[in-house]
Image: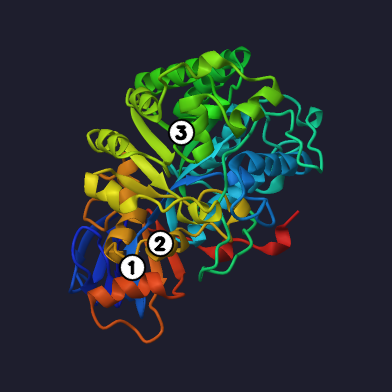
Amino acid sequence: MPGPLVELRARYVLPMDAPPIEGGCVAIQGERFVSVAAKPATANPIDLGDVAVLPGLVNTHTHLDLNDVPAPLGRPGMRLVDWIGEVIRHRLATPSTARAVLDGLCESARLGTTSLADISQAIPPFNATISDHIRKQGATGILPVPSSGNLGATGVLPVPFGDPRTASVASTGETPVAPPTTPRVAPQVAQPVAPRVAPPVASSVTPEMPCVRLVSFLELIAPTLERVELQVERARSHIAAGREAASWLPGLSPHAPYSIQLDLLIQAVALSAENHVPLAMHLAESPEELELVEHRCGPFRDFLERLGAWNSEAFPDGLTILGYLQMLAGAHRALVIHGNYLSDEEMIFLADRADRMAVVYCPRTHAFFDHDPYPLEKMLAAGVVVALGTDSRASSPDLSLLAEMREAARQHPSINPETILRLGTLGGATALGMSHQQGTITPGREADLAVVSLPDGGCRNAADLYHGLLESNASVVATWLRGKPFQENSFSEKSNP
């Protein structure tokens, strides 16, 4: 049985596939929307007050295993190669924990995100931890946060690249002897953002504790040929674990051109197509990456040579970013993470394959590294599917997708704010192949909502509303996941081990 009908009323409802509705009402039965209208369908709708109701936000790129970083790593404007050393220094001092990932899911829910694509080093034992708790929850795709006692003896994520204790990072900035284990992270930039909120800690698992829908992309790194087969086996295990769990969606992430062999990318694309799972890759992110791919020189080559991992066959003559895109096009679905330096030709290639390829823009990360202006206007004009991501909390104040929308609006004042809001809702759902279920407030779709306070002084009309949500400090005040409110009072700092 779908359960009783619940109706919510708000000052504004933004379906995102239709104009805003002032005084709108949204009716939910079970996990689905059944109506959205200007007039209530029931006698006693729940009045949410002076707020705007949006579809649940979709964070299309993050790294929750860095959610334990207490402050941003590195410095604004630093080179990506140098930043990698900062990440490894952190990893040596603080191994990633399953708890960081699970806390990040709850922080995301509190900030209005209802679906999330995470790139992680997680392998089946960690996935089993999530799956076990989902099964206890008894609802597909809902992730409760376990107490620390359920994380195993150490609660530490396995590291698939060897013992990190063998790596060293000199205080002089010497390149470490371990390969990069995560991509770049998001920045702190001079802009109004929501205050950082400490991740909650679960005191117990209850049937009333929904959390974010997760697409778990396994990070694959193989700077040398000897590591390719291990990564392929990890990929197969990850897909199998996701299928067995039937509670979260598996994906694969061959990390970046400088950290994988082409053979690994080819096999990952084949696994994606064969198993109908999405694939994500960091691509066209920095000038140094383009220099490596197209000219086989520069800081990344120096980095790989110091690691003893340089292989000229990994970057054959004539290889280009377009060549990588052509390989990625063979995947079931592909996300190009960042794409800061895509050419016009590459954008057209992506637009022609908008049914299965998308670009993920992380505005605060882009600002942190002081990249050239992001070509968002060109991408949208060409017809590229663009979604938004927070990237890692390691260098961002929070996992707030609303803050990312605001930074995107700041960087691109010529773009209609309604379009920016759509990137963080329907754009993300489309990129993940979930637009038939999420991204809009539409009857029949999953009842995910982000409830946002209105800016001080209110809004005079719809245009004013869109601008107000992106130009103020209005915050997410409630989140609904598959028809249930996310209950912050389910958590207690007192239970923090």
Q: Residue at x 23, y 44 (%)?
A: 383
SS at badge 1:
strand
- Disc nearer the start of the sequence (2/1): 1
Residue under pointer 1: 53
SS at badge 3:
strand
- Disc nearer the start of the sequence (3/1): 1
Quick one: label 1, few (<14), some, or many (20+) residues within 10 Å?
Answer: many
Q: Residue at x 33, y 39 (%)?
A: 358
Quick one: label 2, few (<14), some, or many (20+) residues within 10 Å?
Answer: some
Q: Using the image as rendered, state which of residue 120 and residue 71 is in the foreground.
A: 71
Horizontal side of residue 405 vs 356, given as left or right: right
Q: Residue at x 36, y 18 (%)?
A: 274
Q: Residue at x 57, y 33 (%)?
A: 127
Q: Is residue 31 visible?
A: no
Horizontal side of residue 304 vs 335, given as left or right: right
Based on the displayed image, in which of its 4 quarters is residue 23 positioned?
A: bottom left
Q: CA distance from mark 2 to mark 1?
A: 25 Å
Residue under pointer 3: 281
Against 272, is 199 above or below? Answer: below
- Check if mark 3's residue and mark 1's residue have beta carbons within 8 Å: no
Q: Position of residue 165 (x, y in %)?
A: 80, 31
SS at badge 2:
helix
Q: Using the image as rendered, state which of residue 286 and residue 210 is in the foreground.
A: 286
Tell which tag, 2 or 1, sits nearer the viewer.
2
Q: Position of residue 429 (x, y in %)?
A: 33, 46
Residue type marked 3: Met
Residue type marked 1: Val
Residue under pointer 2: 411
